[in-house]
């Protein structure tokens, strides 16, 4: 005779209580979380309040020392004003996709090997987030699972919930509870900026790991349990930034629908929106509403060790 799971659970609890009453040991069985969480359909406030915009502009100037890099950011933030958006119900991965997950797609012949043969070997661990993966490769992996990348609106709803929180866990920053980078001090910035320009790019000076949160580089997904979002997602702030389905535009949300909004690439090759901040980036980019000032450089073929992804459907 098959006994229903709820009945089994009740019997186990009852047995535990009897053991406790008899002076025995109570064993607590932790509930195993599924791979995905469900986010119910509904409306939420997506985007930035005037106070959010002011804070992000200030943080950009501190992190990048302005130098003209924050001017386009100001324009984009102006086009990301808070508005009410409806998103249909969807499921999204609880954690970021790991290298081990991606390797199974390779073994099935459905994903390319390229991301595993580029970049630093420090990121080549089965339990770490899959990074150095292009937007198309991330999308290809999700399709192998019968899914897709989340839209930017879905990503933000999963991180913010219905109460407009600034961070996935609430409104306080709590720097020890998630994996983020830091900002150079002025003296180091000048030296590194000069070295970066000699090397032909600004990535070096703008991306600085910080081991004060427990990990200098990426951590195994789910390592920061106190960073859980309103529907059960982990690492939506920090660890690795994440590709979304949306093409990037300085226009922000200003010309998008308020129902299931998504910006589709028009000619191909456009940058795509990356969300969540990472182990290598200044903490302000971990905010649930923030975009990266450098997001216009994240073209679909870009491979970077601080960008990964999760899937949705």
Image: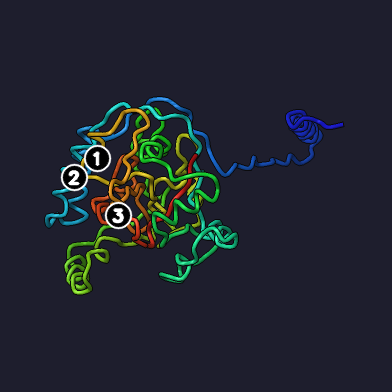
From the viewer's side, name the closer residue of 20 and 179.
179
Residue highlighted by disc 1: 252
Q: Position of residue 144 (x, y in %)?
A: 54, 51
Residue 21 visible in the displayed image: no
Q: Which color mode does the image show? A: rainbow
Pointer 1 or 2: first along the chain? 2
> Does the CB distance between marks 1 and 3 fall below 8 Å?
no
Distance between the alpha carbons at the discs numbered 2 and 3: 28 Å
- Residue 251 spot, x, y in % from top left: 21, 40
Q: Residue 199 at what x, y percent from top left?
A: 23, 73
Residue appearing at x 19%, y 67% in the figure:
193
Q: What numbered label is drawn on residue 57?
A: 2
Which one is earlier in the sequence, the residue at label 2 or at label 3?
A: 2
Q: Residues within 10 Å of mark 2 (few under 14, many from 20)?
A: some
Q: Is residue 287 left or right of residue 224?
A: left
Q: Find numbered disc 3 in the image and state the secondary structure of the residue it sits on.
A: loop
Residue receiving disc 3: 269
CA distance for labels 1 and 3: 18 Å
Residue 79 image label = none
Q: Residue furthest right?
A: 1
């Amino acid at each position: 005779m098959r006994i229903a799971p709820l009945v089994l659970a009740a019997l186990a609890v009852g047995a535990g209580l009897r053991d406790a009453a008899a002076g025995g040991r109570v064993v607590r069985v932790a509930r195993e979380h599924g791979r995905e969480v469900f986010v119910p359909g509904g409306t939420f406030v997506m985007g930035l309040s005037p106070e959010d915009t002011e804070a992000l502009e200030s943080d950009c100037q501190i992190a990048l020392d302005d130098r003209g890099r924050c001017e386009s950011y100001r324009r984009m933030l102006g086009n990301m004003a808070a508005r009410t958006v409806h998103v249909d119900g969807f499921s999204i991965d609880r954690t970021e996709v790991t290298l081990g997950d991606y390797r199974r797609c390779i073994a099935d012949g459905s994903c390319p090997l390229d991301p595993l043969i580029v970049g630093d070997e420090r990121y080549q661990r089965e339990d770490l987030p899959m990074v150095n993966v292009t937007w198309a490769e991330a999308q290809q992996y999700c399709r192998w699972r019968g899914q897709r990348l989340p839209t930017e609106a879905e990503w933000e709803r999963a991180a913010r919930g219905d109460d407009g929180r600034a961070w996935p866990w609430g409104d306080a920053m709590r720097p020890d509870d998630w994996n983020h980078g830091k900002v150079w001090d002025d003296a180091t910035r000048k030296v590194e900026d000069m070295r970066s320009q000699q090397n032909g790019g600004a990535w070096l000076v703008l991306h600085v790991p910080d081991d004060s949160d427990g990990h200098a580089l990426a951590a195994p997904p789910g390592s920061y349990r106190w960073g859980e979002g309103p529907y059960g997602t982990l690492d939506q702030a920090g660890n690795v930034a994440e590709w979304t389905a949306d093409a990037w535009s300085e226009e922000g949300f200003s010309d998008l629908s308020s129902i299931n909004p998504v910006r589709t690439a028009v000619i191909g090759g456009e940058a795509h929106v990356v969300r969540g901040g990472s182990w290598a980036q200044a903490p302000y980019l971990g905010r649930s509403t923030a975009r990266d000032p450098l997001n216009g450089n994240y073209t679909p073929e870009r491979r970077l060790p601080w960008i990964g992804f999760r899937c949705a459907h």
